[in-house]
Each structure stands twice: as C-alpha cells, then as structure tokens.
C-alpha cells in the first residue's frame, strides 16, 4: 500500500496551489509537492494527519487544518471508521505516553532515547519544525529588508523577524549538543543542535532586529522631514510680510536638514535623496526672491527713519533758513534711499508710492525755506531803510512829502514779510511804528 494515495495527493495539491499567490511562492510549492510525490511512490503505512502536517506546515504554516484532516481520512481508507472507539482509546493512551516521555526533562528523555528513541519523535518533529521556520523566516526578512522598495516591505520584514524569534524561542536550549540520529537519518534533518548553530541563528535575528530598528527610525525621520518641508512651503505661500516669509524659509531649511541626517544606506535615505534635490532647488528660488524683497524692505525702512526724523524736526515751525535746509536734507536722504530700490524687487511698487509722498513733503519744506529767506530779506531791507531814514532826519531837515514817501517805502518792504515766518512778529511791530509816524505827519 502506498503511503499517500492519489485522492489525498490531489486534495493536498489543490490546497497548495490555492495558497500560492505569486512567482516568489513557487519555491515553497515545489518543496511540498516533491515531498508528497515521494510518499506517493513509497510503500508502507499510510501517512497520518500528524505526519502530513509535519511535512507541510513548516513550509505552509497557513495550510488549512481541515484539508489536512480530510486528506488523512481519505488516505487511510474507509475501514478505519469501524474501529473509531479502539483507535480513540489507543490514541489517547499513546498520546499520554508520548506526552510524558517528551517532557523537556533530561532525566526522562535520556533513558528513553537509549531504549526507544522513536518515542521522542514528536519533540524531534517540533524542534525540526521550529528550526526550519526560524531559518526560513529570517531569510525572508533579510530579503524584504535589504531589497525593500516601500515602507510596507519593512513592516512585513519586521513581522517575519518576530515570527522567527518565536520559533527560535521554542527550541529546547537545554537540549543543545544532542543530535537525534535516528529521527534525522529518517527525515533528513537540515539542522544540528549545537551551540554554534543556535548562536548563529540568534545573531541573524539580532542583526535583523537592529537593521529593522534603524530602518524604522529612518522612516520616522523621513516622515518628519517631508512634513516639515511641506508645512514650510505652505507657510511661505500664506505669508503676507517679508519677516513671515523669512521664518518660513528657516523652517524649510530645517526640514531639509532633517532629511540630510537620514542614513543614505536605508530605504528612507534613498527616498530622501530623491526628494532633496527638488526641495533645495525650490528653496533657492524663493530665497533669491526673498533676498530682493529684504533689500527693498531695508531701503524702505531706512527711508522711513529719515522721514520720521524730518517730520519730528518740522513740528515746531517756523524755523530759520538753516533749520529748513537741514529738514530738506533729511527728506532728500529718504528720497535717495527709495530711489535705490531696483525695479525687479518685490518692494518696488511700495517704494514708488512712498517716494511720491516724500517728494511732495520735500517740496513743501523747500517752499517754506524760500518763504523764510524772502521774509528775512524784506525785513532786513525795511530795517536798513528805517535806520538810514532816522539818521538822515537827525542830520538834515526833510520835507514832509519826502519823509512820508520813504516811510511808505519801508511799509512796502514790511508787507513782503509773510505770515508763518520767524520774522513776521518783528515785521508787524515795525509796521505799527511806521504807521504811527505817518499818522503824526498827517495830523
């Protein structure tokens, strides 16, 4: 009798093919199918559920247990149904005995291994299964991490490492150094329970855990850097003043610095390098625009400082000509600063608006200066004529008409002194005096 009949083989094969989802899974399928084909050619006792599970579960841990049980029933034939009770009792007794002798205690296992090592088959199968799973999962994790193309690969690699660690933890450390020769000569074990082998597996898992930790930290840094840059870009677009835009560029550069710190050998590092070029190019563009805006803002601010000083100086008018000249100089300094703003700078329009205002104020100051100068000249002329007339009156006798004419000439000069000048009050006092003298002549 063959150990695996055709019906059971087809049932198991169908489930294996259902579980294969892509080309990478073909290797697992081929391994299991070769094992099943070998049993189809062997003569002997039909494979039991436990034996089928041992041959399949190490490669396909997700294999449907119901299919295994059904295949085992089909494989052992329908005659077994009549002996269910006997088999159940025998199985319970055998299971209890096997459980006892397979307890992880050397004082039980060593005597049994010398007399009937086959009874230790379940624990040997468990060790074989856990070892195969641990090594297989580490290899899968290594491939997923070192050839990762997305964060999902890293996450799946971490799951594989955790699963591998669980299987390795189930290996009996106390049993290291013992090799079940009877079992392994029959099942072709791929492992040797030695301290070196155990340490190699442990180191592989430790290495993968460290690599995954680095990859995860790098991915966290990538997310933080991208979020910072994108937030800074939005902040720059929403900014309404040069200072706000400057703050946005500082945050932008901080995000770029975060991306630069990601190790280039990680998946996140490779992704970051591809994004950094575009981020730097965009930052250079806005920095150049902002530099022009800052230059314009500096010149405008300097002009406003001169204008503020000029306005403060002009608050207590009237002033003598030299003060008006100093105030005009301050307005001219403000105008000079505004005229230095280049046409291509973002602040050019504002500079032109302020420039028109300051030029108008400079014109007012210059008009006040001319007004002051003319008024002082008129007063000085009137004063000179008055002194000269007084001296002539004392030295010679002037007729009334000539005297009145010269007094009227003085009044004409005083009439040129404008209101709002420093000499206006003096001119008004002199006018009153001259008018009094004219009234004396008329009387």
Image (spheres, rainbow, N blue to C red):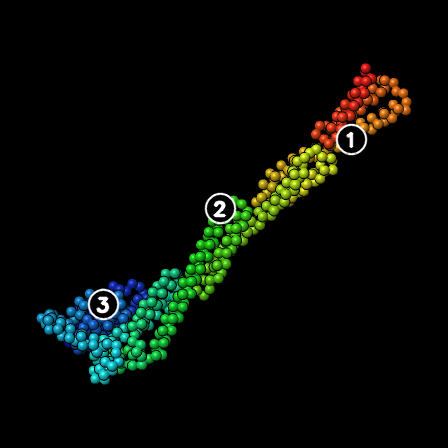
* C-alpha span from label 3 to label 1: 122 Å
Furthest toward the top, the residue is: 443
Question: Image point 38% across, 71% down: which residue?
Answer: 206
From the viewer's perspective, tell me whether residue 404 is left or right of residue 235. Answer: right
Q: In the rendered structure, which disc, 2 or 1, sits on the residue that comes first in sequence?
A: 2
Q: Quadrant of the N terminus?
A: bottom left
* C-alpha span from label 3 to label 2: 63 Å
> In terms of depth relative to the viewer, which is nearer, 128 or 344?
128
The x, y position of residue 96, in whole percent, is 18, 75
Secondary structure of residue under mark 2 = helix
Q: Quadrant of the C terminus?
A: top right
From the viewer's perspective, is residue 146 above or below residue 310?
below
Question: Image point 10% across, 73% down: which residue?
Answer: 86
Q: Write down the residue under mark 1.
A: 377
> In terms of depth relative to the viewer, which is nearer, 203 or 149?
203
The x, y position of residue 441, in whole percent, is 82, 17
Q: Write down the residue under mark 3.
A: 13
Q: Residues within 10 Å of mark 1 (few under 14, many from 20)?
A: some
* C-alpha span from label 2 to label 1: 60 Å
- The quadrant holding residue 35 is bottom left
The x, y position of residue 382, in whole percent, is 80, 27
Q: Write down the residue under mark 2.
A: 238
- The quadrant holding residue 62 is bottom left
From the viewer's perspective, is residue 93 above or below residue 324?
below
Q: In the rendered structure, which disc, 3 or 2, sits on the residue that comes first in sequence?
A: 3
The x, y position of residue 99, in whole percent, is 20, 75
């Amino acid at each position: 009798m063959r150990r695996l009949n055709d019906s059971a083989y087809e049932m198991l094969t169908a489930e294996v093919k259902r579980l294969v989802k892509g080309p990478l899974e073909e290797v697992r399928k081929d391994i299991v199918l070769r094992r099943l084909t070998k049993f189809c050619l062997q003569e002997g006792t039909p494979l039991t559920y436990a034996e089928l599970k041992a041959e399949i579960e190490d490669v396909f841990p997700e294999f449907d247990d119901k299919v295994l049980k059904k295949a085992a029933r089909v494989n052992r034939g329908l005659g077994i149904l009549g002996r269910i009770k006997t088999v159940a009792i025998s199985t319970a007794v055998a299971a209890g005995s096997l459980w006892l002798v397979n307890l992880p205690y050397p004082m039980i296992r060593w005597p049994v291994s010398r007399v009937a090592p086959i009874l230790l088959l379940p624990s040997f199968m468990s060790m074989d299964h856990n070892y195969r799973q641990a090594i297989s999962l580490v290899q899968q994790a290594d491939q997923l991490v070192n050839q990762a193309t997305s964060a999902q690969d890293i996450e799946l690699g971490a799951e594989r490492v955790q699963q591998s660690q669980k299987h390795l933890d189930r290996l009996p450390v106390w049993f290291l150094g013992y090799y079940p020769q009877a079992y392994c000569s029959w099942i072709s074990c791929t492992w040797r329970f030695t301290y070196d082998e155990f340490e190699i597996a442990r180191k592989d898992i430790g290495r993968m855990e460290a690599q995954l930790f680095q990859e995860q930290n790098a991915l966290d840094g990538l997310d933080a850097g991208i979020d910072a840059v994108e937030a800074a870009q939005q902040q720059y677009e929403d900014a309404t003043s040069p200072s706000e835009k400057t703050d946005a560029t500082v945050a932008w550069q901080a995000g770029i610095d975060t991306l630069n710190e990601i190790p280039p050998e990680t998946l996140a590092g490779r992704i970051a390098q591809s994004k950094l070029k575009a981020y730097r190019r965009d930052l250079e563009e806005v920095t150049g625009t902002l530099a022009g805006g800052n230059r314009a803002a500096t010149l405008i601010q300097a002009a406003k400082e001169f204008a503020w000083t000029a306005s403060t100086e002009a608050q207590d008018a009237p002033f003598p000509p030299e003060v008006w000249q100093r105030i005009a100089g301050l307005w001219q300094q403000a105008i000079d600063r505004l005229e230095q703003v280049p046409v291509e700078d973002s602040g050019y329009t504002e500079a032109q608006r302020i420039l028109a205002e300051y030029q108008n104020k400079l014109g007012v100051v210059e008009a006040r200066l001319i007004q002051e100068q003319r008024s002082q000249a008129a007063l000085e002329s009137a004063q000179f004529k008055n002194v000269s007339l007084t001296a002539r009156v004392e030295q010679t006798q002037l007729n009334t008409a000539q005297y009145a004419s010269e007094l009227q000439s003085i009044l004409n000069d005083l009439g040129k002194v404008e209101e709002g000048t420093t000499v206006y009050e003096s001119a008004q006092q002199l006018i009153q005096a001259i008018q009094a003298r004219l009234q004396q002549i008329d009387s």
